[in-house]
Amino acid sequence: MDARRRTLVSVLAAICRTLLGLVFIFSGAVKAIDPLGTVYKIEDYLKAFGGFFTDLLPMAEVAAWTLIVLELLLGVCMLLNVRSRWTAWITLLFYMVMTPLTLYIALNNPVSDCGCFGDAIVLTNWQTFWKNLVLISLAILLVALRKSTHPLWRGWMELVIASTTIASALSFMAWTHHNLPIKDFRPYKIGNHIPTLMEFPEDAEHDQYDISFVYAKDGVEQTFTLDNYPKGDSTWTFVRQESKLIKKGYEPPIHDFEIINADGDDLTWDILESEVPITLVIMYDLAKADKSQMDKIEAMLQQLQMTATVEPIVVDTTASDSTLCDTTRIEEIPTIADAIPFYILTGSSTDQIIAFSLEHPSLADYICTCDPVTLKTIVRANPGVIVLQNGTVIDKYNVRNR
């Protein structure tokens, strides 16, 4: 009986280790593929929490890389049964921190999704919390059964496995960071047609809001609904309208793609409908952009200028005076910038754009603005390049690689 019980306990511990190990490896791997995405997510958290946490923004990259390496290391140690007792306790401690944190996030919704599986699998904040409840239960069970687990590796082999895991993770992330993710989980990957991903189906569900109205009377405010607000009662004074999202509707995969030039003109559909390939240089933050790559961007522009043809505009003008003959005059495009399929997209402030334009005057006429979060999503590089033709992504690369 004791032998059967020991066998069952060992099998149960192995199941817990395997499940937790696979989750850790998958979570760490999809983050390692896109380490900048994890950095951006941690920055989103810190900004949402505000106060003291915003002072930690410079540490976001270190935190992201540490988290990824820790997940991969725990996952490998779980699967290979390396330092099983230590690994069980560290895993439990990990989820003792993450589970209350995800509960707070689910209740307050400071960010739209946790990013625990990167962009590979997007979970809601509540889904993340329930997932962590299951995983912390497995971790508790594994700690309880830790004495029944016997390590397969000892001594120097444990050090070799841990060191190899850490070195491999860091090397892979460094390569990905220098280039681009080997797997693009985002809607702007090569081959995608952006206008299609911007469409809102006719039968799609819209966001649902609870609308209320605040009125004041004799210095006292009172909240009303649309059914009972004091319509036509002059003794009440309207103060404000409040709306609370009660149910999230359908959101297209691409919903914030809007390109505005320096004159305030919306160029979005001119770019998306262009039959000529359009080169978009993405620098979501000009101040943080890799300055050593500016020469490559200027060379890219010069090459496009050499191949661009400036077509004249033919304008038919009929004189208002009937005594004058009808005339036709030809006006050329005023600047060559209008003829070159090249734009620099940034989410930087006006002051940063002015400073950048003074430093790089040859690029000044090509700067447009776009939502910085959208730009971070488009390409994981600053600067990076995306090439569009007829609204389809035909190329994408890190400027470092050209």
Image (cartoon, helix red, strand yellow):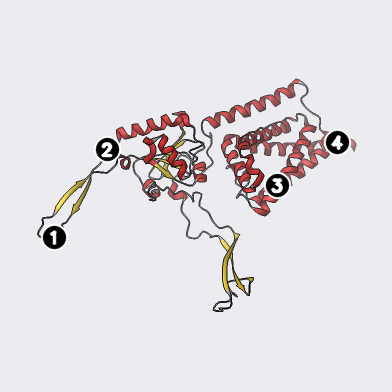
Image quarter hosting the N terminus: top right
* 3D distance between C-alphas at marks 1 and 4: 106 Å
Q: Residue at x 54, y 79 (%)?
A: 232
User: N-terminal of the two: label 4 or label 3?
Assistant: 4
Q: Sort mark 4 into few (<14), some (14-19) or many (20+) by Cα contacts within 10 Å.
A: few
The reply to whether dot 3 and dot 2 touch (C-beta < 8 Å) is no
User: N-terminal of the two: label 1 or label 3?
Assistant: 3
**Front residue of this view, candidates 233 and 167:** 233
Q: Sort mark 3 into few (<14), some (14-19) or many (20+) by Cα contacts within 10 Å.
A: few
Which residue is at the far front? 219
Q: Mark yes or no: residue 294 visible.
A: yes
- Judging by the rendered image, the residue that carries numbered circle 3 is 101
Please give the label number shown on residue 309. 2
Q: Is residue 90 left or right of residue 223?
A: right
Q: Please determine whether, in this image, residue 24 is positioned above or below residue 226.
A: above
Image coordinates of residue 263 in percent, x first then y, are 37, 49
* 3D distance between C-alphas at marks 3 and 2: 57 Å
The reply to whether dot 1 and dot 3 touch (C-beta < 8 Å) is no
Please give the label number shown on residue 6. 4
